[in-house]
Image (cartoon, rainbow, N blue to C red):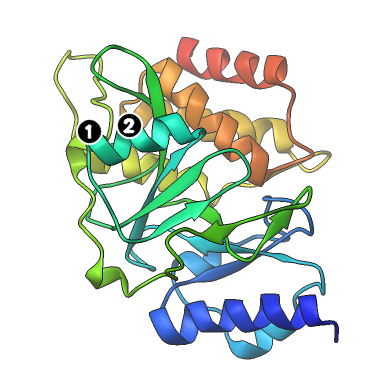
Amino acid sequence: MSTGTMRIKKSAKAYIERFGISVIELRPNDKRPAKDWSVYQERLASSDEVNEWDDKANIGLVTGKQSRIAVVDCESRADAEWFWNERAKTPTVVKTRRGYHLYFQHVDGVGNAAKVKDEKGTPRYDVRGEGGYVVAPPSEIDGNEYEYVFSLKLIQPEGLPEFQPEWMPKIYGNNGHTNEHKAIANGVAYISKIRAVSGQGGHNDTYRAACVLRKSGMHEAEALAAMFEWNITNAEPPWSTAELLHKVKDAYSA
């Protein structure tokens, strides 16, 4: 077993044993899951399961209630600094390929969101909560290693600042009233368990996922953002942008 392999599997087991955080196997040099990971939203992987990972696998941390963490994903240093100064600070920050992950303690009702805007309408960050996951150190993609800032490694989730629900976008249903964040979280969590495989009813499964988001109260634009994230991890092979846009529009015009 190579040093790199030992490091990845040792780190994966540490996330489980030291912090009680659920881990999943990601494809080598990639952020996509190696296999269906829905079971790890309900339980932790065993040491034997981690030992069976590909020798070049990356590590994913399941966010939400199982791991008790929520993560703010900023695509640039500027956006991370904005969140740090305008929203909240946290002792656990990870440098990613292009930006930073800021870790918080998960609270009920927090799901996933893409391109959350600031008060001026500028997209600033994504959120990973119930039904989501993030790439974790010491994973590596295209020669860029995910690593902790401040020389601090992940601390117990209960020691992190709580994620504030107001950091999520407000979603409006057909009646014009704000729906509970929990309804949205449930929709995103539900579709995380839907997989679309080409030649095995993938079109119908993708349409069904989009319909779930519509019924949860999401606006079409928010549903499209959620489906883009779902497409990366749950569609084999992923749909093109044009195909996915068409499927979401079909679901919202039904």
- Residue 166, compared with residue 134, is above or below; it is above
Residue type marked 1:
Glu
Q: Is residue 115 visible?
A: no
Quarter of the figure with the N terminus: bottom right
Picture residue at 74% right of the left edge, 23% below the top: 240
Q: Is residue 218 left or right of residue 199?
A: left
* Residue 135 placement (x, y as % from top left): 58, 55
What is the crowding at mark 1: few (fewer than 14 residues within 10 Å), some, or many (at least 20)?
few
Image quarter of residue 12: bottom right
Dots 1 and 2: beta carbons under 8 Å?
yes
What number is the disc on residue 82? 2
Residue located farthest toward the left when viewing the structure as drawn: 177
Q: Is residue 62 visible?
A: yes
Picture residue at 32% right of the left edge, 65% below the top: 68
Q: CA distance from mark 1 to mark 2?
A: 6 Å
Image quarter of residue 237: top right
Residue type marked 2:
Trp
What number is the disc on residue 86? 1
Residue in front for this viewpoint, 155 or 194: 155
Instruction: Report helix, strand or loop for mark 2.
Output: helix
